[in-house]
Amino acid sequence: MKVPQLAVGLLLSGLAALAFVLFNAATVQRTPVLALASDVQRGQVLEAADLQVVHVGTDDVVAWTPADRTDLLVGRAAVTDLAAGTLLTVDQVAAGSALTPGAGVVGLALAPGQYPTPRLAIGDLVSVVEVSDKLVVMVEAAEVVGIEPVGTQGQRFISLQTSEADATAVAQAAATGEVRLVLIARDGEADR
């Protein structure tokens, strides 16, 4: 008599555990985010067909791009090789690899205090200011297209895309004096 009761008890316990797992899985909130649909090579410009929507559910802090923000990724180049299924962030892409006629990219090795914030990110807009006898705004708005750490003292190599003439002027000013970056907001974007 005890064996059937034990079997029934184990069966009911197992069913209760299964019901709890299924209920919990159904109630976890899933967020639609953008991921890669296929492998992407460094420098490849992303197209809408390269992206797919996946749903993630986690309590951990995970960086991702919401599914409705393809505008942050499409038309930008991958800064490194990325595998299919990778959850995408704006830090993994930069302005498209091909420059338009009249555009230029200038690189600046800057120490803390010469760039506005450690949170400066690819895609941010900055003004370039020359610091000499007086402050001179050299470039009203340049887009950050690359950031690489240099050394251990917080120095960074920051690449900016602007017009060819402005890029040349900034390079000359950086070689003979000091330049600073000032973070500015895009139209319709609140200041950080």
Image (spheres, rainbow, N blue to C red):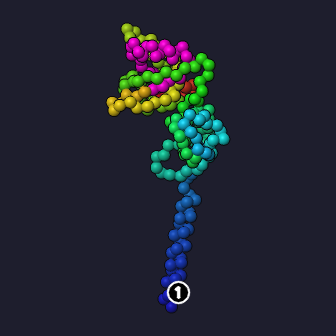
Vertical side of 116 occupied by 164: above or below: above
* Residue 160 on the magenta segment: yes
Using the image as rendered, state which of residue 31 and residue 104 is in the foreground: 104
Mark 1 closeness class: few <14, some 14–19, many ≥20 residues within 10 Å = few
Using the image as rendered, state which of residue 188 and residue 129 is in the foreground: 129
Q: Is residue 32 visible?
A: no
Vertical side of 28 occupied by 130: above or below: above
- Residue at coordinates 52% horizontally, 74% vertically from top-left? 14
Q: Quadrant of residue 104?
A: top right
**Can you give x and y, in whole percent of width and height, for residue 42 in the image?**
54, 36
Q: How many marks?
A: 1
**Can you give x and y, in whole percent of width and height, for residue 39 in the image?**
58, 44
Q: Amino acid at mark 1?
A: Pro
Magenta residues span 158-182
Q: Is residue 160 visible?
A: yes
**Can you give x and y, in whole percent of width and height, for residue 122 in the image?**
50, 31
**Can you give x and y, in whole percent of width and height, for residue 23 in the image?**
56, 63
* Residue 100 on the magenta segment: no
Position of residue 186 in the picture relative to residue 109 (left or right): right
| Mark 1 residue element | helix
Using the image as rendered, state which of residue 44 and residue 58 is in the foreground: 44
In the displayed image of the protein, which residue is found farthest to the top?
133
Q: Quadrant of residue 153?
A: top left
Residue underneath mark 1:
4
- Residue at coordinates 42% horizontally, 16% vertically from top-left? 174
Position of residue 92 in the picture relative to residue 52 (left or right): left
